[in-house]
């Protein structure tokens, strides 16, 4: 149990992973490529493109380890609030420097866990075109390697009854890339210029992985 009040637990994330497996494999046909690239132990950050609401649950159900996602506070409404907390997810206020979220995220990595981040900050084109500095900060501060993840096929049009979802039983590709360090050679510098440089380096690696994942899967979306 984490000593930080309200901190997410590995047990909760493991429960979330089980739910994700049941839902995602029950509703869709995930094809997972390169999951072996995720380190089997120790802290790691999964940097995921974000173009659909199912991207988070899809990764929770397909990643080889339980994942603690940083999720916008707007999602923690009504019964979803205790549920998301219970399965080890982290609420973050994107309008401020949310110190509680930062502390919990660094705690996950400090405990050797897996932190999931949508580095674009919000759902959009899912092409990593605009990255926020948060990913670089967590990677540099913790020393955790980053594994890029491309979720492809989640933006397809659904049926009338499920227009907010890809077609039921459709294939969704989840492609894991090679782990890399935020700063070349490790670095460790936390100055603003160093974080800006790390962000550009990360962006290059993520966009490169996305292009490779599209070639590998034949996906254009």
Image (cartoon, rainbow, N blue to C red):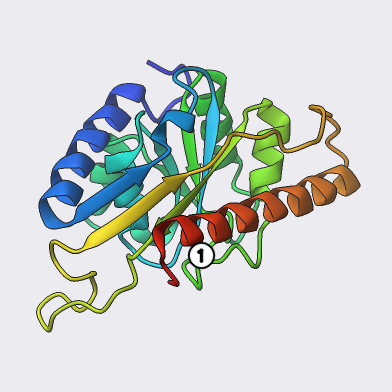
Residue 108: x, y in percent? 49, 27
Q: Is residue 24 left or right of residue 4?
A: left
Task: Name the residue located 19 percent from the left edge and 54 percent from the top edge.
Answer: 29
- Residue 107 vs 81, above or below: the answer is above
Task: Name the residue located 14 percent from the left edge and 42 percent from the top edge.
Answer: 22
- Residue 75 vs 115, above or below: the answer is below
Q: In this view, does 26 lie to the left or right of 53?
A: left
Say whether residue 76 is visible. no
Q: In this view, does 19 lie to the left or right of 61?
A: left
Say whether residue 117 is visible. yes
Query: Going by the picture, which residue comes out furthest to the bottom?
Result: 160
Say which quarter of the image contains residue 75.
bottom left
Mark 1: give few (<14), some (14-19) or many (20+) Cα within 10 Å: some
Say which quarter of the image contains residue 127.
bottom right
Say which quarter of the image contains residue 54.
bottom left
Residue 107: x, y in percent? 54, 25
Q: In which quarter of the image is the N terminus?
A: top left
Residue 18: x, y in percent? 19, 34
Task: Name the residue located 20 percent from the left edge and 40 percent from the top edge.
Answer: 21
Foreground pick, 4 / 69? 69
* Helix, strand or loop for disc 1: loop
Q: Quadrant of the C terminus?
A: bottom left
- Residue 71 vs 139, above or below: the answer is below
Residue 41: x, y in percent? 47, 17
Q: In this view, does 200 lie to the left or right of 43?
A: right
Task: Name the residue located 86 percent from the left edge and 32 percent from the top edge.
Answer: 189
Q: Mark 1 points at which residue?
A: 122
């Amino acid at each position: 149990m984490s000593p930080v009040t309200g901190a997410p637990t590995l047990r909760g994330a493991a429960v979330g992973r089980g739910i994700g497996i049941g839902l995602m494999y029950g509703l869709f046909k995930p094809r997972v490529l390169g999951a072996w690239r995720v380190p089997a132990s120790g802290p790691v950050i999964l940097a995921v493109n974000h173009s659909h609401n199912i991207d988070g649950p899809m990764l929770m159900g397909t990643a080889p380890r339980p994942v603690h996602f940083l999720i916008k506070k707007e999602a923690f409404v009504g019964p979803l609030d205790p549920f998301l907390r219970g399965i080890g997810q982290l609420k973050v206020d994107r309008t401020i420097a949310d110190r509680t979220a930062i502390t919990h995220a660094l705690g996950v990595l400090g405990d050797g866990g897996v932190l999931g981040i949508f580095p674009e900050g919000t759902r959009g084109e899912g092409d990593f075109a605009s990255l926020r500095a948060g990913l670089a900060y967590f990677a540099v501060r913790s020393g955790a390697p980053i594994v890029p993840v491309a979720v492809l096929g989640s933006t397809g049009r659904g049926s009338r009854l499920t227009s907010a979802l890809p077609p039921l039983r459709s294939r969704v590709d989840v492609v894991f890339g090679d782990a890399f360090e935020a700063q070349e050679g490790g670095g460790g510098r936390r100055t603003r210029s160093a974080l800006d440089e790390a962000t550009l380096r990360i962006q290059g690696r993520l966009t490169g992985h996305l292009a490779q994942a599209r070639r590998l899967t034949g996906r254009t979306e």
